[in-house]
Image (tube, helix red, strand yellow):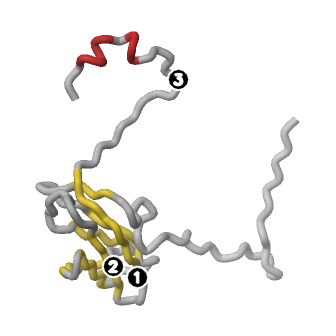
Amino acid sequence: MCLIILSTAIAADGAPPPRTPPVRNFLSATLGSGMVLQRAPQRAVLWGFTGNASGVVVTTKLDGVAMTTTSDATGTWRQALPATEASVSRAHTITVTASNGMRAALSNVLFGDVYLCGGQSNVRRPPARSPALLAAPC
């Protein structure tokens, strides 16, 4: 037996409460300190949200070099960073500020090769039993 209870608050006048848009992070939750961004020749992109405010000027600084962009009608902003060579001996700092007072800072950011790998968690054949896979070039 399954019991599902749905509850909705109703104001004294019988009207449902006004809907508020979901709160989104100024800087996308997929970005953060200690991350690795794709190195040159590609241009890494930072993005985020200024609430529902359009036309907000967002300034991004990579190691003190400033770039600006403006949020669109949905409050989304995107900033392509300059193509940056792989980090060999130092980490980078990125700060993002908006004309509406929002701000974020990222430290220990590296540039390098970024790979996304996927697979099945239910595979039961170990690589040792698949010599062709072991011999394949990467």
Residue at image position (40%, 82%) is 103
Instruction: Please tell me in which quadrant of the rendered image residue 7 appears.
Output: bottom right
Residue 119 vs 11, above or below: the answer is above
Instruction: Please identify the quadrant where the C terminus is shown.
Output: top left
Sequence-first disc among 1 and 3: 1
Q: Residue at x 78, y 70 (%)?
A: 9
Q: Which mark is residue 67?
A: none
Q: Which residue is mark 1?
A: 103
What kind of residue is marked 1? Answer: Arg
Which comes before the other along the chain, label 3 or label 2?
2
Circle 2 sits on which residue? 96
Q: What kind of element bears circle 3?
A: loop
Q: Earlier in the sequence, mark 1 or mark 2?
A: 2
Q: Secondary structure at mark 1?
A: strand
Mark identifier at residue 122: 3
| Residue type of the residue flagged with mark 3 | Asn
Residue shown at 42% from the left, 30% from the top = 119
Relative horizontal placement of residue 128, taking residue 64 as reference (left or right): right
Counting labels gives: 3
Whole-percent x, y for residue 43 in the image? 18, 60
- Foreground pick, 105 / 16: 105
The reply to whether dot 1 and dot 2 touch (C-beta < 8 Å) is: yes
Q: CA distance from mark 1 to mark 3?
A: 42 Å
Taking depth in this image into account, of 24 and 92 the one nearest to the observer is 92
In front here: 82 or 35?
35
Q: Residues within 10 Å of mark 1 (few under 14, many from 20)?
A: some
Q: Is residue 50 left or right of residue 4?
A: left
Name the residue furthest right.
1
**Distance in Å between CA atoms under marks 1 and 2:** 5 Å
How many neighbours does mark 2 have within 10 angstroms: few (below 14), some (14-19), or many (20 or more)? many
Residue 20 lies in quadrant: bottom right
Percent coordinates x, y for residue 77 in the rendering: 32, 72
